[in-house]
Image (spheres, coloured by chain):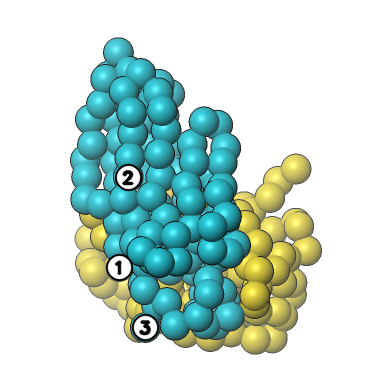
Amino acid sequence: NAGVTQTPKFRILKIGQSMTLQCAQDMNHNYMYWYRQDPGMGLKLIYYSVGAGITDKGEVPNGYNVSRSTTEDFPLRLELAAPSQTSVYFCASTPAGGLFPGELFFGEGSRLTVL
Amino acid sequence: GDSVTQMEGPVTLSEEAFLTINCTYTATGYPSLFWYVQYPGEGLQLLLKATKADDKGSNKGFEATYRKETTSFHLEKGSVQVSDSAVYFCALSGLSTGNQFYFGTGTSLTVIP
């Protein structure tokens, strides 16, 4: 039972480089989310998706892009990495939204450092 | 907009002490409320939830009651263990949030033997 799988777990980037954080879930969940976690700041929503082909910006989308071509995959693209993007990134999914949202299932996180 | 405010940490308790972590929320509708726990080096996992006013969520000895009149969802445990050391996050989600989950800043708990 894989759940939500994120890769890579750790990455160091140089300023201006680009990369993609991969996220895959095998639970057939429609809703998927990307968060970043900065020390003492809790979780900030970057982007989310309510189904294949549909994505929406969250609270802190600048510097990131996403796509959702399949139900399973929700990659997060960082273009022109900046030190401010140093953070731990979490992907999450849930089967339900609306009036009674379901449990969020989280990946183990991807720790990104931009130098 | 909708938001969650939770008690600042860190919190340090002795084993078997009583735990309370305060959480209050602001919401335009009637969201579901959640407590998530994050153990060192891991992602968040659901601890308990409540979907409507006066509901009590409970799990692993932890409890929280959805109080609409005080807009609160405080987390309690009668006797903490060393294994409860973690970061605890209060969160809300519902129709009014447009399928988004809003998290508090997290409260770090350390339990010492």
Identify the residue under disc 1. A85
Res. B1 mark:
3
Type of amino acid under label 3: Gly
Residue A85 coordinates in the image, percent (x, y) = 30, 68
Q: Mark 3 lies on which chain?
A: B
Q: Identify the residue position indicated by label 2 in the image.
A: B21
- CA distance for labels 3 and 1: 25 Å
Crowd rating for badge 1 (residues with CA inside 10 Å; few <14, some 14–19, many 20+): some
Instruction: For the C terminus of chain B, give its image quadrant.
Output: top left
Residue A18 placed where, x, y %? Answer: 40, 72
Judge whether residue B97 can be spotted in this image.
yes
Which residue ends up furthest to the front in the rendered image? Answer: B69
- Of all chains, the one bearing label 1 is A
Q: Quadrant of residue B50?
A: bottom right
User: What residue occupies the far right of the structure in this picture?
Assistant: A28
Mark 1 or mark 2, which is nearer to you? 2
The hue of chain A in the figure is: yellow
Q: Where is residue A97 in the image (x, y as percent from the top left)?
A: 65, 73
Q: Which chain gets the cyan colouring?
A: B
Residue depicted at 56% across the width and 47% down the height: B57
User: Is mark 1 in CB contact (under 8 Å) with mark 2?
Assistant: no
* Amino acid at the residue labelled 1: Gln
For image coordinates 55% across by 31% down, the residue present is: B60
Marks 3 and 1 belong to one chain: no
